[in-house]
Image: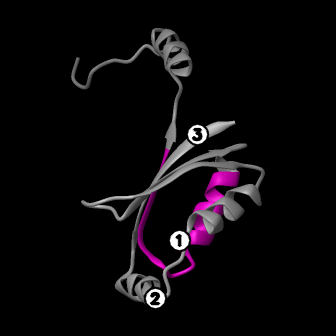
Amino acid sequence: MALYLTRFSYTPQTWDRLTRNPEDRRDAARSYIESVGGKLHGFWYAFGSHDGYTLWEAPDNVSMAAVAIAIGGGGAVSKYETTPLLTVEETLVAMELARTVGYRSPGA
């Protein structure tokens, strides 16, 4: 299964609701990814340009996209970005394959 890093920010209304009724959102996140056959590896809140980060494992891009679409369309987040992560081994294979691509710089 593939790993995905998600960065998200809540809307002000979501922060207001959570402040009035604090809730551990890990359980919700876990249920979302498990519904498509995946696993939640971590959930963190942060300071900075995003309010939080999650590390997910999903069977494929389509499954992860389904979770992202459902969360993004739910109205609780103002930003939601997902990055597929590659293992070192996958990246080494990609480097080997890159030699066969035959890239040519523009204007060369």
Instruction: Please tell me whether mark 1 sits on a helix, a strand or a loop.
Output: helix
- N-terminal of the pair, mark 2 or mark 3, is 3
Q: Which residue: 64% across, 65% down?
A: 27
Q: Is residue 98 left or right of residue 108?
A: right
Q: Quote the CA–CA distance across marks 1 and 3.
A: 19 Å
Q: Which residue: 56% across, 76% down?
A: 73
Residue 25 pos. (x, y %): 55, 69
Q: Quote the CA–CA distance across marks 2 and 3.
A: 30 Å
**Residue type, numbered disc 3:** Leu
Q: Is residue 64 magenta?
A: yes
User: Which residue position is annotated with label 2?
Assistant: 17
Q: Quote the CA–CA distance across marks 2 and 1.
A: 17 Å
Colour convention: one colour
Instruction: Please tell me whether mark 2 sits on a helix, a strand or a loop.
Output: helix
Instruction: Look at the image and give the residue range highlighted in magenta.
Output: 63-83
Up-down relation of residue 61 to residue 24 (above or below):
above
User: Which residue position is annotated with label 1?
Assistant: 72
